[in-house]
Amino acid sequence: MELVAGANAGCIPCLGGNNSFEKEIGMLLGVFTLFHVILSLIGIGSGLVVMYGLLDSKRLDGWTKLFLTTTVATSATGFLFPVHKFMPSHVIGLLSLAVLAIAIAARYRYGLAGGWRPTYVAMSAIALYFNVFVLVVQSFEKVPALKALAPTQSEPPFVVAQLAVLAIFVVVGVVGAFKFHDVPIRTAHAQAGR
């Protein structure tokens, strides 16, 4: 979930020279970035499966655990990049972790009972949207053909892409909240209230 422009934007300044320590740090940062990206892509892929399940009124427990776990991990690992200032990626990460906490509570603590069902759907859709939002940002930053269309990410192609993604997630979230009518999950908290 790295929203930086370029490989070293916002990073701790280089120490100068090309010594082996700097190469090793660069290689470790590359491996960590790859790990972060893989987590993000797994979160997006599993999240799309979960959203489809919600639209079909299916819980898809295994996919849901994978989605929530990898999306939390994506947001958390985004804070481990070596930067020296607060960045837009940190805002997205904090918002993502907040909505994920609500989604996890709605699903596992409150068992999707009552108003927790649409809350879970909305928070899951928002968390997935944040990941896809970052995917679009990174795609326009890293893919040469897209970067040529929107070099500053303020041009119409970028804005249209982000608005289309937002519209899709709003529709999926609203429709999912109405269509997801599975039996509530039994939890210790729900059973204690009986």
Image (spheres, rainbow, N blue to C red):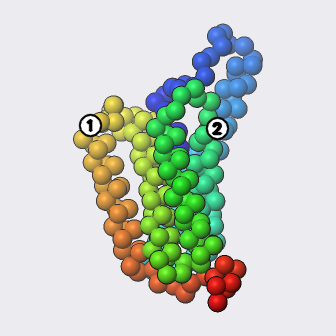
Give the class, few, some or many, for how many residues have Cα within 10 Å of label 2's Cα (few <14, many ≥20): few
Residue found at x 67% / y 85%: 191
Please state which amino acid type lies under the numbered disc 2: Leu
The residue sitting at the left extreme is: 156
168 lies left or right of 49? left
Q: Which mark is residue 155?
A: 1
Q: Secondary structure at mark 1?
A: loop
Residue 20 lies, with reference to residue 137, above or below; the image says: above
User: Residue 69 is drawn in which quadrant?
Assistant: bottom right
Q: Quadrant of the C terminus?
A: bottom right
The residue sitting at the top extreme is: 17
Residue 112 lies, with reference to residue 88, above or below; the image says: below
Q: Which mark is residue 80?
A: 2
Q: Which mark is residue 139?
A: none
40 lies left or right of 162? right
Residue 192 in the image, given as x and y percentages of width and height: 68, 84
Residue found at x 41% / y 75%: 177
Residue found at x 67% / y 37%: 31
User: Residue 25 is drawn in which quadrant?
Assistant: top right
Residue found at x 34% / y 36%: 153
Please state which amino acid type lies under the numbered disc 1: Glu
Which numbered mark, 1 or 2, is in the foreground of this view? 2
Give the mark nearest the N terminus, 1 or 2.
2
